[in-house]
Image (cartoon, grey):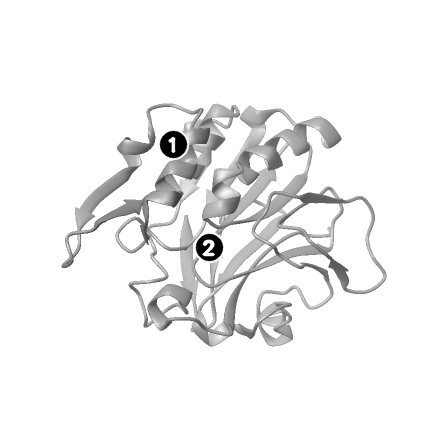
Amino acid sequence: MSVVCGTEYMEVMTGHDGIKAFFSLKDGASDGYPYDRKDVFAKLGLESAIPVWPKQIHEDRIAVIGEKPGKPLRIPDTDGLITNVKGVLLTTVHADCLPVYFFDTKKEVIGLVHAGWRGTAAEIARKAVREMVKVFRCAPDDICACIGPGISRCCFETGRDVYDAFADSWNVAGNIDDVTDIRKNGAGEEKYYIDLKEINRRQLEAEGVLTENIGVSSHCTCCEPELFCSYRREGGTYRRMGAGICMLSR
């Protein structure tokens, strides 16, 4: 599902001709938004692609890129992108939140969303599939998805409010307790460890994406300091890792 290339990025969604998708490691991180590491783009063969930079707000708005911009495009208040235009590099930035990548092999459509816990609770990955179906007439069972590196259940400790936010809106297979460990800390308080990757996977399945077409990264950004930046582990960080996907011009 992914292969580490050098010290600056890993490629994801490998094996799909015509696309290039990546997630940067901490050596390939940027100083916040936007993700504009031209050296990384060049190593990936994407130096001529036009980047699209959404200004993320942890919500569920998805923008459609219908034509190739003449220069890098900034989009305010957006956490997801889809396009059928070749040579457009969709990007997001991350410091624990999940990137979710999409590619329809038949309609030649790509997508990328930023799914933190709020975006996951708002079902942004599921809504990206719906938007691909609505705008480009994609069939869900033709869509391949990859849930990239991000904070895993081992490290995503939350309070009752986050647990309740998922429980109150749960509408996929199983229930919130299937993807949550409840532990008491030293003060005797209950803490909830929630599996955001599995929730996104179930949401994609519920929207019709085939199980065999969904890849899930085992990498946890919080507990692998040799590879990743982590907002949670570092108690806040201005560094952001970049995710990107581009449909190559032939």
What amino acid is at disc 1?
Ala
What amino acid is at disc 2?
Cys
- The vertical placement of 245 against 51, above or below, is above
Taking the image as shown, residue 176 lies to the left or right of residue 212, namely left
Residue at position x 57%, y 71% in the image: 32
- The vertical placement of 223 against 191, above or below, is below
- The vertical placement of 126 against 151, above or below, is above
- The vertical placement of 209 against 24, above or below, is above
Question: Which residue in the structure is indicated by mark 2?
Answer: 97
Circle number at residue 167: 1
Residue 132 image point, x, y percent: 67, 33
Q: Residue furthest right?
A: 70
Residue 7 image point, x, y percent: 43, 73
Q: Which picture quadrant has residue 36?
A: bottom right
In terms of depth relative to the viewer, which is nearer, 16 or 90?
90
Q: Which picture quadrant has residue 176?
A: top left
The disc, 2 or 1, on the residue closer to the chain's N-terminal end is 2
Taking the image as shown, residue 75 lies to the left or right of residue 245, namely right
Residue 234 image point, x, y percent: 36, 72
Taking the image as shown, residue 147 lies to the left or right of residue 65, namely left
In terms of secondary structure, where does tag 2 sit? Answer: loop
Circle number at residue 30: none
Q: CA distance from mark 2 to mark 1?
A: 20 Å
Residue at position x 73%, y 31% in the image: 136
Q: Nearer the viewer, mark 2 or mark 1?
A: 1
